[in-house]
Image (cartoon, rainbow, N blue to C red):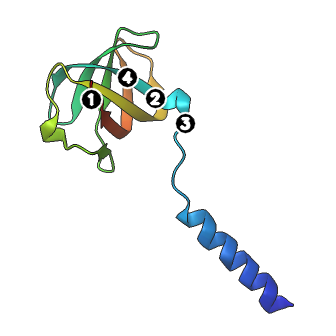
Amino acid sequence: MEIFVIAVFSALLIIITCLPDRIIEENLLDGTISQIDNDSILVESTSGESPFYVAYMMGETVFKNISINQLSVGDNIKIEHTGQVLESMPIQVYCKTVWKEIV
C-alpha cells in the first residue's frame, strides 16, 4: 500500500512539473515599440490605461520566434509580464515573454 501511495505522488509530481506555464490574460500588454535600450523597451500601448509603458528584460525573459536583435522601432509586440506593475509614469513592468506580432 505504501508503495502505491508513493508511486501515485511521484506520478502527480512528474505530471505537474511537465505542464506548460499558463498565460494569465491580465498580465498581457501589447503595443508598438517606440524605443529600444539594452535592457528595456519603451512601448506605446494599444490597450490599457497608460499610453506608454517600459518593459524591462530579465535574464529569464523568453522571446517567442524572435530575438531581441530582430526587434525594431515600429514593430507591434505582445508582452507577458510578471504581474508586478510599477505605477509610475510611464508604467514599468518586467517581461516574462515577448512575441512579435506579424501584421
Q: Quadrant of the C terminus?
A: top left
Q: Are marks 1 and 2 in contact (CB under 8 Å)?
A: no
Q: Quadrant of the N terminus?
A: bottom right
Q: Are marks 3 and 4 in contact (CB under 8 Å)?
A: no
Q: Earlier in the sequence, mark 1 or mark 4?
A: 4
User: Toward which corner of the image does residue 87 lie, by quadrant?
Assistant: top left
Could you say whether the residue bearing mark 3 is in a helix, strand or loop?
loop
Q: In this view of the protein, which residue sits in the foreground, 52 or 78?
A: 78
Q: Looking at the picture, how far across and down is residue 17, in whole percent?
A: 56, 65
Please indicate whether residue 58 sits to the left or right of residue 2 in the image: left
Q: Looking at the picture, how far across and down is residue 7, in whole percent?
A: 72, 84
Residue position marked by numbered label 2 in the rendering: 28
Q: Rounded to the nearest whole Å, what is the CA distance between mark 3 and mark 4? A: 14 Å
Residue position marked by numbered label 4 in the rendering: 30
Q: Rounded to the nearest whole Å, what is the CA distance between mark 4 and mark 2? A: 7 Å
Q: Rounded to the nearest whole Å, what is the CA distance between mark 1 and mark 2? A: 17 Å
Could you say whether the residue bearing mark 2 is in a helix, strand or loop?
strand
Q: Looking at the picture, how far across and down is residue 27, in whole percent?
A: 49, 30
Q: Residues within 10 Å of mark 2 (few under 14, many from 20)?
A: some
* Residue farthest front in this picture: 103
Could you say whether the residue bearing mark 4 is in a helix, strand or loop?
strand
Amino acid found under the numbered disc labelled 2: Leu
In the rendered view, tell whether residue 80 sits above or below residue 54: below
Could you say whether the residue bearing mark 1 is in a helix, strand or loop?
loop
Amino acid found under the numbered disc labelled 1: Ile
